[in-house]
Amino acid sequence: MSRVDLKEFVSGFLVEAGEHLRTVNTNLLAADTAARKGEASPRAVRELFRSLHTIKGLAAMVGVEPIVDIAHGMEAVLRAADRGGGKLGLPAVEQLIAGSKAIDARVRALADQKPVPPAPVKLLEALAELEPTLPADGSAPSALLAMEPELEAKLTASEKEQLTAAVAQGKRAVRADFVPSPERAAEGLSITSVRERISAVAEIVKVLPIAAPRTDKTPGGLKFALFLLTTAPDEVIAEAAATSTSELVPLTKSAPPREEPRPL
């Protein structure tokens, strides 16, 4: 690679890294707010992991190993938190904030054409020692997932927590299926365009591609299951997903009410 190419490559890295760091800081603020309330922040945890994974990959491509090391340590914490339902304790959030600042400092050093300092040893050690704070009482959410076991098995703990927590706050959890076809593609309907349409009326928790028998309804032998959280009516969701209201599937059911103990 020539010097000119390398310079352009580094410039691209600086732009991309800056954008992802802004996303990291936004989600760290959400995680901090949740941690102070003793709540999980599954969506923020997943978004943090995605952004840091991208930053790590970009840093590796331009050979900035200190950023790779810091992002890797942060990823490990977030991966454990994701498996634990997306709950981070304040100590974990504080170390992740320190990691974000350390990455930002090294991005700035690269931008200023200064030597990039190595990853702070104490920070890496602190990240390695962290464990996510899990719910102590083991209490179940007030809404229970109701879906096919094979689909539920493909959801992470934090995605399940995100669904049940949002339902407890008054949102509906719904599955909408989109079936691609040549005719729909000719009309400009694809999973990408449908995602954009649905994002305007619902929060997309996950999109799963599902193999299906080739029939008139599924000519390509494929459909996409979109797991959604929304307050919009079924008609709005169905229109955005290019399906019918009868095809929408509720993802949760109310938990049975607890029986109050009888007085002795």
Image (tube, helix red, strand yellow):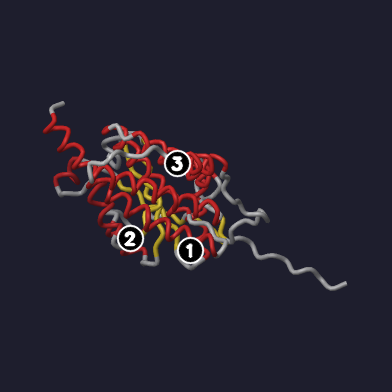
- Label 3 residue SS: loop
Name of the residue lying farthest toward the bottom: 263
Which residue is disc 2 drawn over?
Answer: 237
Which residue is disc 1 drawn over?
Answer: 33
**Residue 5 position within the rendered picture, expressed as x and y whole percent measured from the top left:** 13, 32
User: What's under tag 1, amino acid-wise?
Assistant: Thr
In this view, the mark in front (3 or 2): 3
- Quadrant showing the N terminus: top left
Q: Is residue 206 left or right of residue 167?
A: left
**Residue 227 position within the rendered picture, expressed as x and y whole percent measured from the top left:** 40, 51
Q: Is residue 113 left or right of residue 35?
A: left
Residue in view at x 53 percent, y 42 percent: 80
**Residue 254 position within the rendered picture, expressed as x and y whole percent measured from the top left:** 57, 61
In terms of depth relative to the viewer, which is nearer, 31 or 229?
Answer: 31
* Discs 3, 2 touching: Cβ within 8 Å: no
User: In the rendered view, would you say 38 is above or below 66?
Assistant: below
User: What's under tag 2, amino acid-wise?
Assistant: Ile
As drawn, the label of residue 120 is: 3
In terms of depth relative to the viewer, which is nearer, 185 or 131?
Answer: 131
- Quadrant showing the C terminus: bottom right
Residue in view at x 28 percent, y 48 percent: 108
Kindly report the distance in space between the C-alpha atoms of the residues bearing marks 2 and 1.
30 Å
* Discs 2, 1 touching: Cβ within 8 Å: no
User: In the rendered view, would you say 215 is above or below 40?
Assistant: above
Kindly report the distance in space between the C-alpha atoms of the residues bearing marks 3 and 2.
48 Å
- Label 1 residue SS: helix
Question: Which of the marked residues, 3 or 1, is nearer the chain's N terminus?
Answer: 1
**Residue 32 position within the rendered picture, expressed as x and y whole percent measured from the top left:** 48, 60
